[in-house]
Amino acid sequence: MTYPYPQLNPPPFRWMARNTTEPKVHEWIRTIDPEQAAEYDWSQVDVTIVGIPLSRSSISASAASENPEAMRQAWKSFVPYSIDEDVDLTPLHVVDVGDVRQHVTDIPYCHRQIKEAMISMRRTHPHALPIMLGGDHSVTAMLVKGWKEAHPEQRIGLLQFDTHFDLRSVVELGPANGTPVRQLIESGTVRGEDVWNIGLHGYFNALSLKKYADEHGVNYVTLKKARQQGLQATLQEALADLERKVDVIYLTVDMDVLDMADAPGAPAATPGGMRTDELFELVLQAGQHDKVQAMDIVCLDPHKDVRQVTVKAGVYVMLTFLTGFMLRKQHNRI
């Protein structure tokens, strides 16, 4: 047994803490002393953050493996307070538990580690909400499979903000970043009817993928239609449908859902995508729902980024989700 559990390495660096009543995000999020990890008290932890530095499974070249560290570095530019919602996040006990151990070339090993890490998280601190910083989108299939193995009695719903279906052929591409949703459906981990994708647009999904989605009952709303009927109304419809059917909802945010002007560091970002403010509103709403119990942020390549535009958007997504989660906790206490 190592660290808090065997699949993890400690964070690659630890910020120097200082005594302050108004910390920055990097001073607020806690880390664990590796020498005391075995005795760590998880009972008061609300949220865990784990990095998944994998991008060798990307269809196109990507350095998304560098994103967890880039987002941690950017924490120093933010404070844990939302002036828009007047929400102070500091009462939340958030712990950065580090990165899933990965191999330089062995992708199947990497994927097994990711799945096993999720199982360990659910067994070690099942009450804490996990936020995963990818990594490419292939990690989502492994994380959800790990959740299912840890909780076989639960029916899992997948809420996906994405430009793409991610339903490409596993036979053709293997467990890549274009196939995670198909992997989950074909493995029986998630039912097609329990998938909701919001954000599809333009000329970036083949007709065969739409047909596959229709055949398997996948729910999807194009960005154009979502804007016509209202993004928040669209998400409310998705959440209401999932709430009736599933026990837990896993939120996956592919940063390529953003317009390429807003996300130069998302390798597959395209023209015509979401604005950042639209994505933030959706994430805030999702964070407030009781059944949304996990989230990942994927497909962000800091090497392609410009002036940290996408990295900071990724941190903003994380903090916005935590703001929704804090509002949820406040509401449940009333």
Image: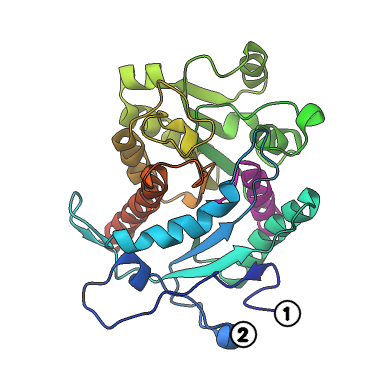
* Residue at the (69%, 26%) spot, across then down: 168
Image-based side of 297 in relation to 148, left or right: left
Dividing the image into 4 quarters, which one contains the C terminus?
bottom left
The magenta stretch is 132-151
Q: Residues within 10 Å of mark 2 (few under 14, many from 20)?
A: some
Is 142 inside the magenta-drawn segment?
yes
Disc 2 designates what residue?
A: 38
Q: SS at mark 2?
A: helix
Image-based side of 133 in relation to 30, left or right: right
Quarter-of-image position of residue 16? bottom left
Disc 1 designates what residue?
A: 1
* Residue at the (55%, 26%) spot, across then down: 164
Image-based side of 186 in relation to 96, left or right: right
Quarter-of-image position of residue 194? top right
Q: Which of the two residues, 197 or 153, is positioned nearer the viewer here?
A: 197
Q: Which of the two residues, 245 or 74, is positioned nearer the viewer here?
A: 74
Check the image and report above or below for 83 versus 101.
above
Name the residue furthest top.
207
Q: Which of the two residues, 17 or 178, is positioned nearer the viewer here?
A: 17
Rendered location of residue 261, percent (x, y):
37, 30
Image-based side of 232 in relation to 145, left or right: left
Residues at circles 2 and 1 in contact by the CB criterion of under 8 Å: yes
Is 287 inside the magenta-drawn segment?
no
**CA separation in Å, label 2 and label 1:** 9 Å
Please identify the dominant SS of the magenta region. helix
* Residue at the (21%, 77%) spot, across then down: 21
Dividing the image into 4 quarters, which one contains the N terminus?
bottom right
Coloration mode: rainbow
Rendered location of residue 51, percent (x, y):
56, 59
Sequence-first disc among 2 and 1: 1
Q: Which mark is residue 206?
A: none
